[in-house]
Image: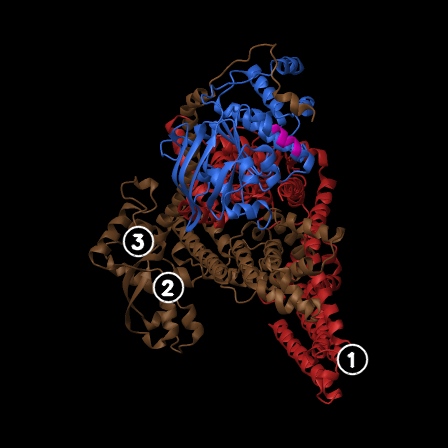
Chain colours: A red, B brown, C blue
Amino acid sequence: MQTFTLACVLLVLTYFGFRMGRGRALGLVGGKATRLHSLPGYYGYYVALWCGIPAFLMVAAWLTLEPTVLTMLTTSSLPADVQSLSKNELGLVLNDIRNLASGSAARANVSPDIVAAAERYATMRHLGFAAMAVVALAVAVAGLTFARTRVTPDMRARNRVEQTVRVILIASSTIAILTTVGIVLSLLFESLRFFEKIPATDFLFGLEWSPQTALRKDQVGSSGLFGAIPLFAGTLLISFIAMCVAAPVGLLSAIYMSEYAHSRVRAVAKPMLEVLAGIPTVVYGFFAALTVAPFFRDTGDLFGLSISSESALAAGVVMGVMIIPFVSSLSDDVINAVPQAMREGSYGLGATQSETIRRVILPAALPGIVGGLLLAVSRAIGETMIVVMAAGLAANLTANPFEAVTTVTVQIVTLLVGDQEFDSAKTLAAFALGLVLFCVTLALNVVALTVVNKYREQYE
Amino acid sequence: MSEVVQVGTPSAAGRPVAVRDTKALVAKSLKRRYAAERRFRLYGVAAIAFAGFCVAVLFVTIFSNGYTAFWQTNIRLDVTLYPQDIDPQGDRSPKALSTANYQKLIKQAFGDLFPDVQNRREKRKLFDMISPGATFVIRDMVLKDPGLIGKRVQISVPLSDDIDQFAKGFIKAETPESERRVKDAQIDWFQRLKDRDLVVTEFNSTFFTAGDSREPELAGILGAIMGSVFTMIVTLAISFPLAVGASIYLEEFAPKNKWTQLIEVNINNLAAVPSIVFGLLGLAVFLNFFNLPRSAPLVGGMVLALMTLPTIIIAARAALKAVPPSIREAALGMGASPVQVVFHHVLPLSMPGILTGTIIGMAQALGETAPLLMIGMVAFIVDIPGSPVDPATVMPVQIYLWSDSPERAFVERTSAAIMVLLCFLIVMNALAVVLRKKFERRW
Amino acid sequence: MDMTNVATEMTDAAPHLPSHGHSQAAGEPKFVTRGVTVHYGEKQALFGIDLDINTNEVTALIGPSGCGKSTYLRCLNRMNDTIPICRVGGSIELDGENILAKEVDVVHLRARVGMVFQKPNPFPKSIYENVCYGPRIHGIASGKDDLDEIVERSLERAGLWKEVKDRLMEPGTGLSGGQQQRLCIARAIAVDPEVILMDEPCSALDPIATAKIEELIDELRENYTIVIVTHSMQQAARVSQRTAFFHLGDLIEHGDTDQIFTKPKNEKTQDYITGRFG
């Protein structure tokens, strides 16, 4: 709320800066705007930018750093015995302090040290904010006055404003790079910490996965097993089942719609596939767990097959249904990119439509279709909610689709959801799995996008 | 000249060439080929039909499971608000009124309906039939109008979820008693209530006005909706300006060099990175590095903004690209600066396309679950969030949480929540379609 | 298999192929078209064309762009069926049978009336696969050896064999433009059609490649009835025996090529061939 008020004040100040810059420029030339280098508004923008940008950057910097700084200060002011606690326990204490300070926890049963620390924390936060607000406002006013003195009729206000705009545009385009860098660094950093505890070879080639680490050091079986092969196998099994559903159905429906279907059929079928594409994955997960899995189990019972109610089959089939529109729209693009001349050449020789499709169009479109399917595979591998809700948790190393298997994404979710200390091998394992997931999907995407782009260029 | 001449040159010597009757051979092949043609067509029809079947089954399942959640089985109860129970001091202080033992009143009123039930265990079973939420109904009434104390009021309070499910026919009397959550005695009592015309089925407004709860009959989706709203506001506020800025730069100003190529490849790849990886990013950077609050829509919105950014950028670039160069040339020819050209002409013209892409990206973000699980938006939160930094959950996560609950009544509420979520998505997508139709421009 | 061996045999045998027993002698009408009209949606593109096309002759269709000559050509093997909004009226008889009739099988028809297009359009497959595509789908060849033989003979006849015999398995798209077009001709004759329709086959080619194709057309005349749409009057004069002049969807004049180019009866024809318009 305070932040919001401060932002509003700054905005008003910025607007004031705009009026001032504009007024000053006009005043200098006695209202004859033609004697200015730029339009009067640009002088306004110039002053407003000087007023607003530094101040807002200040606020943003403080807001991101505030928790870290406060935590550091609080920790250093705690009694020595508390400071010497292990990192995890210290984290719990700090959490208590924060809760106390924000008033969301009761004061009963808390040591006076902690209460004092909480009070300090709260005061520091208020002080910090107040100081920051004062500094930000001062910066804004300083920027405003400075820019105002710089306004002269000859100043190239437009060029300066436009230069700033360009810098802002460039900055926003680098966010994509920053995101990737952020992903890579955070995954890599945590994974390296994981590999300090568990050797990378054990992780990548181990056959057993049971990440339950013991609570106490002396407990039996204290170190969990982090062999990820069963997870990879499970992921591949489910993705394979999904592709078995999605590839033929998606491809055939794309072919039917682009080559055969009457425009009226297309008008119904296309939106229908779009509906399928727009349904959130959590809904598919619910559908898989509630309807499809029991259906497969009961059908299996009829034929004397024992199908687990968390079978890879159910999760895979539903995931396949989810991917159908994805495959279909990509194939549709690719098939439409095949030049009409190919079709004519084939019809001119007396080929039927299906012969033309199977023997000319599909081979011609093959690279594009393969690229699309690779993208679909990468989607299946990274899909989370369906498997979290419909696949199992136990890491079985099996190729039997009737059994329950678990996947990389399921394990990431199970390892990270709920309260846990951040340093345990269990938590870090999730990042190692995430790193594998990221690398595999990245490789698939790069290959697929290259193939598809090459294919597009071929017919352009 | 050369080989072309030789081609047709007949030569007397040589092996006799088989004379074939192409016409007959082709005619002979026709039947087989048309059969293949029909088969192939049939595959296509089957594929479309399969997709249609999936859509139908999905919607029918969700609807048939969920529509009952919009009704709640209530009981009409005459409760006497004895002053000695509510406000023994008689000072009508708010504190006394809000902490009074209203449950006793409910039990009294409900027990009076069944004077024959005296056994302690039986009584417990009897009181289990009424939702714990009944006490809040009375409390709120009294707090609103303390003048009611001492009077006899008729209220309609929810029955417990099991009885509600029984009334809706999801728990069947035919099932053996040991496997059923509603006991024979309760069925009997419920029948008696019905015979006395005290059972009413009312619109389940709680579902739309309450936050989460452990009791299905008290659980509502408003908390999740508000969480989604705050999350979406943050997502929109971050991703829209950034995406527009990035696409303007890449489409209008960027030189074609290695750096911009890298950005482009990056954006295309980010669009295909699994969403859960963005959750890991949020956990490692926003929560652990910057110490931002857990479970907050602010962080959720930031993560989703990064996730939807590539989608919006790709759509925005397509929209910018669709503006013909002649417009730019015309404006440049008038002496406008490149920045003016973009902000005065190109951007306004491409805005409908950009907005369509943004809405589609936001719809995607609204349905996203996995990354939010990573940053703790999966907690059980009863309060309805009032700002982007309050702990909250969002609609898809609420669906996930409820779908994990064992109570039968939560299945129905999960489906109902899905229906609400789908309604939001349909509205958003319809908006995108309308926008596209209305402002679509063919150059 | 030993292709080179067959090659020698084939050149030696280079058969004077009456392979499908073309019954008519040269000069008799192969196609008899009466009152052919074509509509694209609301727009009429052809206004009642009456034209005979003779067996084992080259008939050239000339006229300015948009005059309907390509549209007419595409009626002869019902390629217009692939355009949904296109309607064809009148009668087109191939050996006395109206090919516009509903019961006529277009697949069968197109096997008899092959087509070569304006832009070379080899399939993105090997040269060999391109040529054997037709025989394969129509079930003409009785085995692998037979197929090899057809491929070789067709390439031979299209004058391409020598250039490509060592790289039959390379993609057809890797050939030069002229070679590609001859590959498309080879592909068409591999089905052993009675008629070959050519829609401006040289418009995308350089003069040398064009000369080769023109020579080829002249050779092919011996065994096939050829209808060629061309923009170039010189080409029409060089390769055809008969010429038909189209203008704005009407057939203005048709007759022996010599006569059309030396003493046209119609003024518009005169204007066109002397280059006053078009």
Residue A218 percent location from the top left of the image: 67, 39
As for residue B240 lying within the magenta part, the answer is no
Where residue A80 appears, as percent x and y from the top left, is 75, 59
Amino acid type of the residue that numbered disc 2 sits on in the rendered structure: Thr
Q: Which SS type dominates the magenta stretch?
A: helix
Residue for badge 1: A146
Is there a contact, CB below 8 Å, between mark 1 and mark 3?
Answer: no
Determine which of the numbered discs, if any, sits on residue B126 in the image: 3
Residue A38, quarter of the rendered image: bottom right
- The span shown in magenta is C211-216
Instruction: Point out the frontmost of discs 1 and 3.
Output: 1
Judged from the image, the secondary structure of the residue bearing numbered disc 3 is helix
Q: Disc 3 sits on a residue from what chain?
A: B
Count of marks placed on residues? 3
Tag in front: 2 or 1: 1
Which residue corresponds to mark 2? B135
Q: State which quarter of the image contains the C terminus of chain B.
A: bottom right
Report the Cα–Cα distance between label 1 and label 3: 78 Å
Determine the residue positioned at 54% across, 51% down: B369
Q: Residues within 10 Å of mark 1 (few under 14, many from 20)?
A: some
- Residue kind at label 1, given as amino acid type: Phe
**The quadrant where residue B107 appears:** bottom left
Badge number at residue A67: none
Q: Is residue C215 magenta?
A: yes
